[in-house]
Image (cartoon, rainbow, N blue to C red):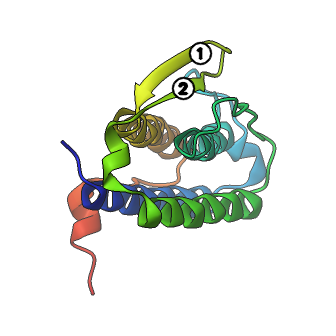
Amino acid sequence: MPTLTLFTTMFAYGDWANDALLAAAATLDEPHLDQPFDIGPGSARRILAHIDTGESVWLNRWRGHAQTPWSSAPDTTLPDLRARFLATRAARFDFLATLDPARLDFEQTYRDSRGSMFRAKLVDMLLQGFVHSAHHRAQAVNVLRRLGAGVVELDYMMHVRQPA
């Protein structure tokens, strides 16, 4: 069973990966950020906004807000998007730092993006929050590479091997 330490490690890696994607996206001009692709939400900016929104929505669901609406801002600027990622990161860190490990096995209700109500253990909701972002990060890497932003290496060990 995953522990809070493991979740903290996973989300720290996710934050590092988000930073790498935003840095690569910053090398592109505005028209390239919005160039449509037949992958995920459809453009580099939309994929990044979707990752950000997903992380924010899952955080609110973990906090017990079952009715969290899914409202992305696909037309946001990269600096605004970076600020949103940083705000979610800080709020997630605070949530995990104060979370009682016994709560991981408690079931919570939440409404998905289509309005259907579900129940899940908090541990599974935390895993979904991480996996959702990882899935869309792979889409973003593909789109950014196709746009000429270079190869964005998001392998976990690249994160671990960062110099002190």
For the point 51% across and 55% down, the residue is 21
Q: Nearer the viewer, residue 128 or 38?
A: 128
Q: Quadrant of residue 100?
A: bottom left
Distance between the alpha carbons at the discs numbered 1 and 2: 7 Å
> Disc 2 marks which amino acid?
Thr
- Specify whether residue 153 is in view: no
Q: In the drawing, does residue 152 fall left or right of residue 53?
A: left
- Specify whether residue 67 is in view: yes
Residue 119 image point, x, y percent: 47, 21
Q: Nearer the viewer, residue 84 or 25?
A: 84
For the point 76% across and 60% down, the residue is 80
Q: Quadrant of residue 87?
A: bottom right
Q: In the drawing, does residue 108 fall left or right of residue 22?
A: left
Q: Quadrant of residue 65?
A: top right
Residue behind mark 1: 117
Residue 104 image point, x, y percent: 34, 43
Count of labels in the image: 2
For the point 69% across and 58% down, the residue is 84
Is 94 located above or below residue 63 in the figure? below
Residue behind mark 2: 109
The quarter of the rendered structure image containing the C terminus is bottom left
